[in-house]
Amino acid sequence: MSTTKKWVVTLASDRPISEVSNELTKTGFDVDQVLDQIGCITGSASDEVVQKLRKVPGVADVSPESPIQLPPSDESITW
Amino acid sequence: MAKKESTNSSNGANRASSSVDELLLAALERNDTSFETGRYVVTFKEGAMEEGLQSLQTQGMRVADTRDFDNQALEMDSVGDADAVVFSEIGSALLGGNAAQERSISTFAEIASDSPILSIDPEYFVFADSMYSEFLQGRATQTAQGTSNEFLRGFLQATETIAKEMRENGNSQLEIEEEVQVLGATWGLNACRVPPSIRSGVGIKVAVLDTGFDLGHPDFAGRPIVSQTFVGQPVQDIHGHGTHTTGTACGPKAPVGTTPRYGIGYRSSIYVGKVLSNSGGSVGSSVLAGMNWAVANRCAVISMSLGGQGGVQPSYTAAGQAALNNGCLIIAAAGNVPGGPTGYPANSPTIMSVASLDSNLAPSSFSCQGKIEIAGPGRDVFSSWPRPTRYRTISGTSMATPHVSGCAALWAETSPNMRGLTLWRKLQASARHLPFPATRVGAGLVQAP
């Protein structure tokens, strides 16, 4: 049993995002944000569920969230 | 629009051959304070000069071509009643106002993707000291005879300068402009030729997705700011990075006291999206949420001084494409990993990647390489910082990015067509060429219009 992680689902533009979102939920994806302007859905799921998500029509990609970290505030060179 | 229509009046001179006196008089008559002459400058796509010339002729325009004159020294009083003057060497044309309007050519016209035309911009009166002094010098060395012709020649130089600034290569800037010393501005703003620009970013929404903003900073007093947090913390910036980048992109024309000017789009509409926490971090989804918000608000410019090391993320590529489809342009920092490749989100093909330059206009040692579209001042950049510090000088592609974003806002102001991919191309086409590989500096140093 794998642990639950955060994922970003990127959609192809051939299907309404709400429709895809509903199907992702049914597949076991715990939807966090539906970003309709940029065609992405974020949420959490186990690795097993992710394999199924990738097969949902209208899904172009499922990737782990990409962390971003600026250096501390007192550094003179930032990102 | 009423202003445009009024130029149709019989006494509203805006012919291609109109003298600057006639143009000024006509502008006064129509009470036009926009600095627009009523004529238009059409810039043709690279290599599409002949096609563009033909398209003007097909539309029934009488076209004068500089190639028809000895040494291409076009005499304005020989142009007669031509509707357009084509500057063949620089791939642009000057169009009479009425002639253009009769053919529905205006800055509001939709430009088809297969058109030979890159952009249509208003022609502006130029009152810059350098231009005027050059003109006066030109006159002083001549005899008193033919001052009218000299005046026209001076004006032609001015129009050519405007056209030159729109051409593909930043090398073409007049040397006389190099001598203009603008005091009271940061080295970065001077390098980008921001102080002489007549643009302010007015009417252009600029989103800065970062650590938030010091909403009480005295330099922004009275400035409307739309803000939203995506990290569960108040927008008020505790880290500082967001206040610094917003300052460069949107800061004031004249900061309080003796502080030099450090901001570019001083009348742009500021949209602050807090997508990084006060410790400067994000798991990623808050950044996407901020991008979604900025696109939903149709921010013409979306500035992202953030990123991580890794391959192209499909979600950022999708967001960049959505932005372009909606008239928005995402501009992102390439990253600060010496010798390292451009990080995400800047490495997405739909997002404009910015490298950093030092004040000698050489690539900064820390600036990432590879997919680079353009460069901006990124070393030792002075800008705003949360109170009580107020100002700080720091370095990074993070600092180069808002220079490009601020200039993008100024360019966006020049035309409602100057959005998305057109804006992207204009920024690259107008950049100052630098003697370094494109993998380090892209098209070169960003320049204000």
Image: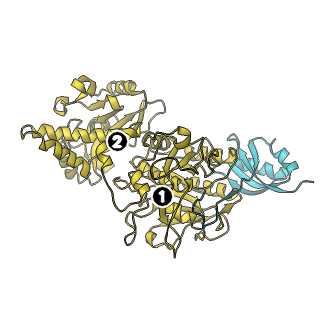
Chain colours: A cyan, B yellow
- Is residue B427 positioned above or below A33 on the image? above
Q: Chain of mark 1?
A: B
Residue nearest the observer in this picture, A28 or B360? B360
Residue nearest the observer in this picture, B442 or B330? B442
Residue type at tag 1: Ala
Earlier residue among tags 2 and 1: 2
Q: Which residue is mark 2?
A: B173
- Tell me if label 2 and label 1 are in contact, CB under 8 Å: no
Left or right position of B115 against A42: left
Q: Position of residue B17 (x, y in %)?
A: 20, 35
- Is residue B342 positioned above or below B235 on the image? above
Q: Which mark is residue B143?
A: none
Same chain check for tags 2 and 1: yes
Left or right position of B135 against B102: left
At mark 2, the secondary structure is loop
Identify the residue at image location x=45%, y=50%.
B360
Q: Which residue is mark 1?
A: B249
Identify the residue at image location x=21%, y=48%.
B132
Residue type at tag 2: Gln
Measure the C-alpha gap from mark 2 to mark 1.
24 Å
- Is residue B390 positioned above or below B99 on the image? below
Q: Position of residue B156 (x, y in %)?
A: 23, 38
Identify the residue at image location x=58%, y=69%.
B237
